[in-house]
Amino acid sequence: MAGTSWDIALIGGASGIGKSRLAAQLAAERHAFVVEFDDVVSAVEAMTTAEHHPAVHHFDDIPDVSRLPTDQVLDLQIATARALEPAVLGVVRNRLTVDVPAVIEGDYLTPAAAAMAVRESNGSGRRVRVVFLHEDDPEQITANYASREPGSGEQRHRAQVSADYSRWLADAAVRHGLPVAECRPWDTLAARVGQLLG
């Protein structure tokens, strides 16, 4: 892992702000493995039921989330993220046993889980670093969704939830002493995140 300032980089942030793109860029630069936490979330949802693990199935019986008030969707998203914190730690613990650097990115990575992962890695000889991306302009996120998912139409409700969630994550990251990077300007984001991870 020569040349890296980290063994595991945790990249948190809301949906539609560029985490996956940044993670791929960082991984390519550092010859690292990318873990998309969304895949883990899907696996957890597939192997559990709302009856036994209701905290990870808040959205199961909601056919159209866009019909709910954005603050209600935000509350459900935060509750789901908190319920998934043990899964985040499980992924980090597993990656710490592998001698290949990894970038772990996802919407449901909370600052509390990230801070705990950093604490657990102390004394292990492995370096876990964290940064949360932040974009709180729903218009920008709407444009990002339109570019990424052109067939889905305008997703203003989803973008507003994402902007609100981004603010919640950024505030929580600051409380946990974790760095936050503004997504814009995009062309300097990778360099700025690299400095924060270093």
Image: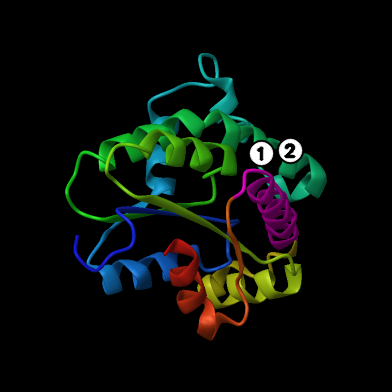
Q: Residues within 10 Å of mark 1 (few under 14, many from 20)?
A: some
Q: Quadrant of the C terminus?
A: bottom left
Residue behind mark 1: 78
Q: Which residues are magenta?
A: 157-177
Would you say 196 lies left or right of 15 here?
left
Task: Name the element at disc 2.
Answer: helix
Q: Quadrant of the N terminus?
A: bottom left
Q: Amino acid at mark 2?
A: Asp
Which residue is located at x 68 percent, y 71 percent?
Answer: 142
Residue 192 drawn above or below residue 175: below
Residue behind mark 2: 75
Label drawn at residue 92: none
Q: Residues within 10 Å of mark 2 (few under 14, many from 20)?
A: few
Would you say 176 lies left or right of 9 here?
right
> Along the line of sight, which residue is nearer the eye, 67 or 105?
105
> Along the line of sight, which residue is nearer the eye, 94 or 123?
123
Which residue is located at x 36 percent, y 32 percent?
Answer: 90
Which quarter of the picture shows residue 25? bottom left
Residue 46 position, x and y percent, is 40, 31
Which quarter of the picture shows residue 21? bottom left
Residue 182 position, x and y percent, is 63, 70
Residue 115 drawn above or below residue 11: above
Residue 167 drawn above or below residue 183: above
